[in-house]
Amino acid sequence: MPLATSRRLLAVLLLALAALFAAWFAGDARYLQALAVFSLPPLLLAIGVLARRRTAPFWSGVLALGWFCHGVMLAWARADGRAYALGEVLLALGIVAATSWPGLQARFGGRGGKRGTAKD
């Protein structure tokens, strides 16, 4: 997967996470505060990724670990928001994969020759 495709996928996943949080807290009395705390960070990171900011994918991966933990905790503790929590977990895993893919591809993929063989 080329770097540009990885960035686009990361941006889509971040926007989907922001939309998930907006839908999750739609009926909350403190909706604007919930949007500021939950939806704004992935939205700003998606903008940073699309603007080709170097640190945006890194911080997306770091925050995705927190989103993953949050989703697992709520999926385990509450039955009423379990579908949203599991969606958060899946999107967080996708974000971690999208941020890690270019490094994994550089380390393990397509170098042209077989590794570990002696040249005669």
Image (cartoon, rainbow, N blue to C red):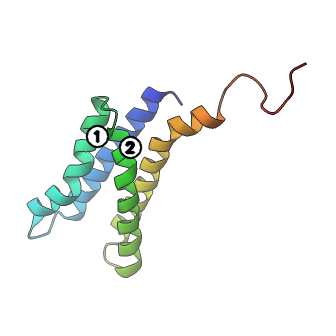
Task: Check contact, mark 1 vs mark 2: CB within 8 A.
Answer: no
Res. 116 image quadrant: top right
Three-letter amino acid code at the position of disc 1: Ala
Residue toward you, 25 or 97: 97
- Residue carrying label 1: 46
Residue toward you, 18 or 111: 111
Task: Look at the image and tell me whether residue 13 can be seen.
Answer: no
Task: Look at the image and tell me whether residue 10 can be seen.
Answer: yes
Residue 98: where, in percent of width, then height?
46, 42
Q: Is residue 77 left or right of residue 29?
A: right
Residue furthest out toward the top: 120
The answer to whether 107 is drawn above or below residue 20 in the figure is: above
Q: Residues within 10 Å of mark 2 (few under 14, many from 20)?
A: some
The answer to whether 115 is drawn above or below residue 98 in the figure is: above
Residue at 32% of width from left, 35% of height from top? Answer: 49
Task: Determine which of the numbered discs, if any, sits on residue 58 in the image.
Answer: 2
- Compute the Cα span from label 1 to label 2: 12 Å
Three-letter amino acid code at the position of disc 2: Phe
Residue at 76% of width from left, 23% of height from top? Answer: 113
Q: Residues within 10 Å of mark 1 (few under 14, many from 20)?
A: many
Q: From the image, which quarter does the C terminus lie in?
A: top right
Q: Secondary structure at mark 2?
A: helix
